[in-house]
Amino acid sequence: MTEVLATTPGLYPLPDWAKEELAELKGHQKDDLISGDESAEITGTYDRVRDELVDWQIEAGLDRIVEGQARWDDMLAHPLSVHENVETRGIVRYYDNNNFYREPVVRGELSPNGDVATELSASDATQAILPGPYSLSELATDEHYGDDAAFLEAITEFLAAAVDSFPPVETLFLLEPSLVTDAPGDGEDERASEAIDTVAAATDAEVVVHTYWGSIPEKPYAHLMDADVDAIGFDFVTDHEGSVYNIQEYGTKDDIALGVVDGQNTLVETPGEIADRVEWVRDQVPVESFDTVYVSSNTELFYLPANKARTKLGALAEGAEEVSL
């Protein structure tokens, strides 16, 4: 029997009270963003935010709880932005939307720093969130390792060390939007798959490689299938036809993550609509039988106002309960 679990890819919006409080404590300039050496006051505010974001998910009835990533001012680039051997420079666009992050420029060895593990340990999270190695390498600039392959390997080892230091969790979501938006070319696609494999091997948790903002081109998808992960996540909001094609043509893992709630649109889906979308996917791939289906938003949720994100969490949990597979 298929297990249906409601979850998200993390990166939640700040509650309104926290925006005001942190603006007073941190300021509004680029140099005021998170750097890893926050004051006790700022740390205390983020601790309260983390607790509240966890409470949102528990109250909504989600099956997997994330820490919320409220400190991630630089979104998926965060693990590098707080590293001592990384210099944050100018503001650059975060993929194809109206959000921006500081360009992380790697200028020395990427030794383990424990930042993400510390956040996880301070919460009741049952699911960890990390950028995938390929996406993180694409968001960053290398001024130390010398070539793309060596840089990807260093990013991979850095992330694997981070995962190895995590407290026990049930699931790890590796977020890999760049596999879609800036797909790896020949040779690079195989290295990206091997990098994901290496990070996944660092944990006993179930590993989901979640992709979004479209569907992965065929050849990188075929290589991704070689990675020893438990599930691949698909964006059925942005490109349901391309996602279904990949599954029909190349198959997928025994588990699957379905991005069926729009993480960037304030229109809140009904539980019935969410269940219908999951069941629609089942009908398109009748030859596939899944052990676990993760029902999720397609993207991170920080694009939304806090009240809309919270409402979507409730709809997501209710929709997953209504699914009949």
Image (tube, rainbow, N blue to C red):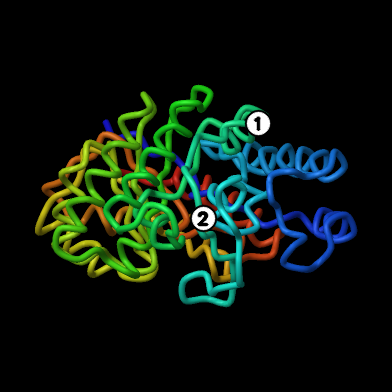
Label 2 crowding class (10 Å Cα cut-off): few <14, some 14-19, many 20+?
A: many
Residue at (31% x, 53% y) in the render: 279
User: Quarter of the image holding residue 5?
Assistant: top left
Residue of label 1? 123
User: Quarter of the image holding residue 176?
Assistant: bottom left
The quadrant of the rendering that contains the N terminus is top left
* Residue 53 as seen in the image, left or right of residue 115: right
Relative image position of residue 162 (x, y in whole percent): 48, 34
Relative image position of residue 64 (x, y in whole percent): 51, 36
Residue at (30% x, 61% y) in the render: 179
Viewer-nearest of discs 2 and 1: 2
Residue at (21% x, 42% y) in the render: 227
Residue of label 2? 76
Number of marks present in the image shown: 2
* Residue 312 as seen in the image, left or right of residue 280: right
Kindly state the secondary structure of the residue where label 1 is placed.
loop
Q: From the viewer's side, name the closer residue of 249 and 200.
A: 200
Instruction: Please say if the residues under marks 2 and 1 sit with CB atoms less than 8 Å apart.
Output: no
The quadrant of the rendering that contains the C terminus is top left
Residue at (45% x, 51% y) in the render: 296
Q: Which mark is residue 83?
A: none
Q: From the viewer's side, name the closer residue of 29 and 272.
A: 29
Relative image position of residue 91 (x, y in whole percent): 61, 72
Label 1 crowding class (10 Å Cα cut-off): few <14, some 14-19, many 20+?
A: some
Q: Earlier in the sequence, mark 2 or mark 1?
A: 2
How far is disc 2 from disc 1 in space, using C-alphas?
Answer: 19 Å
**Three-letter residue code for mark 1:** Ser
Relative image position of residue 17 (x, y in whole percent): 85, 55
**Three-letter residue code for mark 2:** Leu
